[in-house]
Image (cartoon, rainbow, N blue to C red):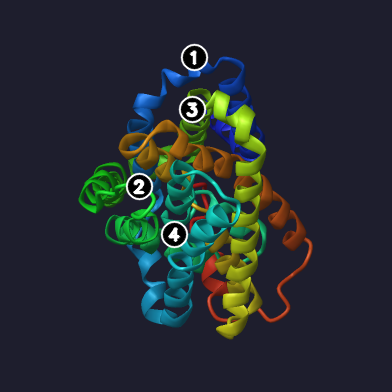
Amino acid sequence: MTVIKNIADFVGRWFALLVLAGAAVGLAIPDQAALVAPHVSLLLGVIMFGMGLTMRPVDFAIVARHPKAVVLGVLAQYTVMPLLGWGIAHALGLPPLLVVGMVLVGSAPGGTASNVIVYLARGDVALSVAMTSISTMLAPFVTPLLVLGLAGSSLPVSASDLFLSILQVVLFPVVAGLLLRMAAKRFVERILPVLPLVSVVGIVLVVAAVVGANADAVLSTGLLVALAVVLHNSLGLGLGYLVGVVGGMPESARRAVSVEVGMQNSGLAAALATAHFAPLAALPAALFSVWHNLSGALVATYWARRAPRDATGTEEEAASTDASPRD
């Protein structure tokens, strides 16, 4: 168990580089990597079950104590990123499948590694966990409607099929993990330290599979899609912080909202794109998964050296909140 925990700690520290390595493997041996593509939804289900194991009912208690911050954060999550994805895709003249892919990334719930980034950035971890949890629970209802509204004119979109997929690969596994932790708390808490290993391996496999299935597209249009992804993530981080400023939140909460808005559950976007559209539609999600973990690490490093000047409110709750990786 100690050896596995050490390995889990290692992959957690080097997560961004491992995801980058997964993308490189997808390019180096595309045919072999593409064989994993049909199993992306299953991999995501395993990852989301692991996320559910890290969740507790107390994660939702912050909503009652600080509703303004949570509501503003979740609203920003489901407005800023979908509109940015749609706008950037059209501004760069991306083809319809890539437009859908960008909208899917923007319409996904919060990124599953965001809690760790917020923790390292000295942000409000309690707020971050609440935003991730609530946006994930809302995803089956909100994500299909956003994709239908923003991308329905580019390609046919079945909101009901997306709804069922998100139930199967996100909501059901998350709730199952949450219930298992409540029923077998001691057992689950013993295995929590090794969950990052499962999550990182799953995300790396998803990225390798999507890149492998789109190797030709990566080589021909990869730079343009990469530009779209970098703009999407960077503007999301900046506008998320601005929402915190306009909302009068303390500095620690602004950092949390910035990271939660800028980091997306790109694994879910990749799974939905692969299952309901075509492998090319999953390309933005794969590149986003690589980039947002790198940018998140940079943001965390910058903020880690600067203590929040006016942190108040939920900061004391952050110290007691589980900040383990939810990838």
Residue on which the image places disc 4: 132
Q: Secondary structure at mark 2?
A: loop
Pick the front one: 322 or 187: 322
| Residues at marks 3 and 1 touching, judged by CB atoms closer than 8 Å | no
- Report which residue position mark 3 lands on: 205
Label 1 crowding class (10 Å Cα cut-off): few <14, some 14-19, many 20+? some
Dot placed on the residue nearer the N-terminal end, 4 or 2: 4
Residue type, label 2:
Leu
Quick one: SS at disc 1? helix
Is the residue 35 above or below the residue 218 in the image? above
Image spot of residue 215 (x, y percent): 56, 24
Residue 248, how many percent across, how many down? 59, 86
Mark before the other along the chain sequence, 3 or 1: 1
Q: Which residue is mark 1?
A: 31
Q: Which residue is mark 2?
A: 155
Task: Indicate which disc, 3 or 4, sits on the residue closer to the N terminus.
Answer: 4
Q: Residue at x 40, y 44 (%)?
A: 268
